[in-house]
Amino acid sequence: MTASAAEAKEDPRRPALPLDVLVADDEESIRVTLSDDLEEVGHRVTTVATGDEALAAIASTRFDVVVTDLRMPGADGLEVVKAVEEKGAGTEVILITAHGSVESAVEAMRHGAYHYVLKPFLNDELLLLVARVARIRKLERENRSLHEDLGRLEGFENVIGTSAPMVEVLNVVRTVAKTDASILIEGESGTGKEVIARSIHRNSERRDGPFVALSCAALPETLLEAELFGHEAGAFTDAKKARHGRFELADGGTLFLDDVDDLGLPVQVKLLRALQERVIERVGGEKPIGVDIRVVTATKKNLAELMQEGKFREDLFYRLNVVPLRLPPLRERVEDIPLLVHHFVRRFRPRDEYEVPSDVMDALCLYPWPGNVRELENSVERAIAMAGDSRTLKKEHLLLPSPRFKNAAHVPATTTLKEVVRAAEIEHIKRVLKTTGNHKAQAAALLGISRKNLWEKMKEYEFGSD
């Protein structure tokens, strides 16, 4: 790659895809220089000199981004924002305003404006904002296309993700699903372990047999044995008739045991025997019953560590861990978030078209999601409910916790506000750098600052600037 090609690739102003941009400003110098710079990086630009001309252009043409001065002859920037909001075409508005009109700019943002910049400004500042919109649009477009392709693959309809970690998981699943090998899925709560287990079943030779799931954490140990192996009539109080256990119900198919890390040692012994011999005995029974099953298990904890602590049997661990499969937490597959969001929106409102503006998607991508995909699903459902009759999701609909820096609850009351803000800024910059894979140009664009400004902050906060 030549030096010039490398520089172009690193240029954060260069968009992920070209956008249609409307520039509305009564100052000719701003219109000319800004349109030249936007076209230079690849955008298609239309310019107008008045608010009335902007309203006419918006009514007749669809734009991805509208850059408008707040104060213009005729209609002002706030009217332009409201016109874009009423049209509902997914257009993002960036306002140009003077210091004395910041309150008006904030009011415009309440009506859906994406961002505002204060005069005097550098064109690069606006180009970075437009590039951010382009990046989100490209990601949304690719994710929709990949989702459609993925949905056509038999057995993977509910596996949502095209990031490198998820592609790696699916490649392993495709390879081992056709065998009868035991699979141990490791992953945090909410990462979708049962979804993967069902996909393994649907892509196996046992797809026509039953898929039976049981959470080992959902029952007390006194009932778990009967749930797994069944019981005979009279085996214990209230056992009025014989009952099949999950092993028998899964005969000819797949048995999925979630949260095996919660199994007590006595049940582990009986589970090991059943897996080794493919024979069970009901509680209170004496007759051995043969079963033909494929076993897939899942754990939210590291079973190898539990084994070292004496809390999990070594022989059972190796019996379950024939094929290990690690599901990444959502914070390690941030690029899948837009795809998941659109999937959940379609699931909860299949007949309605909802818009997810780029600032909302940015907020979703920056949040760490400790509850993983399950938490994201709940957040999208809540946002749709909060939106009411509106078909546009807003950040306030998400009800996400405010970002806090580590140990904020333990900050002494004597700590100054400047120190608290500094600590929060450090954590947020580090989180964005991690999200972008330490890509400085992308991180600066997400943070809404120049790369030079990011470098200066990293140098000031002493956590590396290379």
Image (cartoon, rainbow, N blue to C red):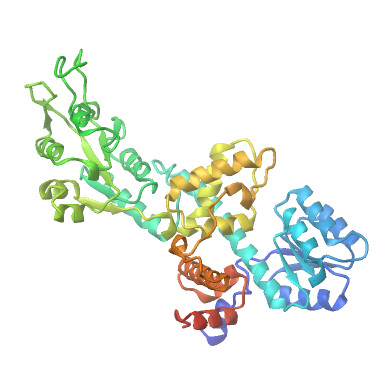
**Residue shown at the point (53%, 73%) measured from the top left:** 419
How far from the left and from the top, in percent, is residue 10?
55, 78
- Residue plotted at (62% across, 66% down): 132
Can I make out residue 459 in this image? yes
- Residue 337 appears left or right of 231: right
Query: Between residues 360 and 16, which one lies in front from this camera angle?
Result: 360
Residue 355 or residue 237, whichever sits in front: 237
Q: How many marks?
A: 0
Spot the residue most to the right: 74
Q: For residue 112, say whether it is visible.
A: no
| Rendered residue at 44%/48% (across/down) | 373
**Vertical placement of residue 257 versus 49, above or below:** above
Locate residue 263 relative to residue 168 in the image: left or right. Answer: left
408 in relation to 464, above or below: above
Coordinates of residue 210 in the picture (x, y in percent): 29, 30
As drawn, the residue found furthest toward the top would be 240
Say which of 81 and 293 sits in front: 81
Q: Is residue 82 above or below residue 201?
A: below
Q: How far across and how far down the image is residue 385, in percent? A: 60, 38
Q: Residue furthest front?
A: 414
Comparing 140 with 42, the one in front is 140
Pinpoint residue 190: horizontal percent, then vertical percent: 39, 46
Instruction: Choose top left, top right, bottom left or bottom right for residue 38.
Output: bottom right
View extreme (left): residue: 286
**Is 341 rendered above or below residue 352?**
below
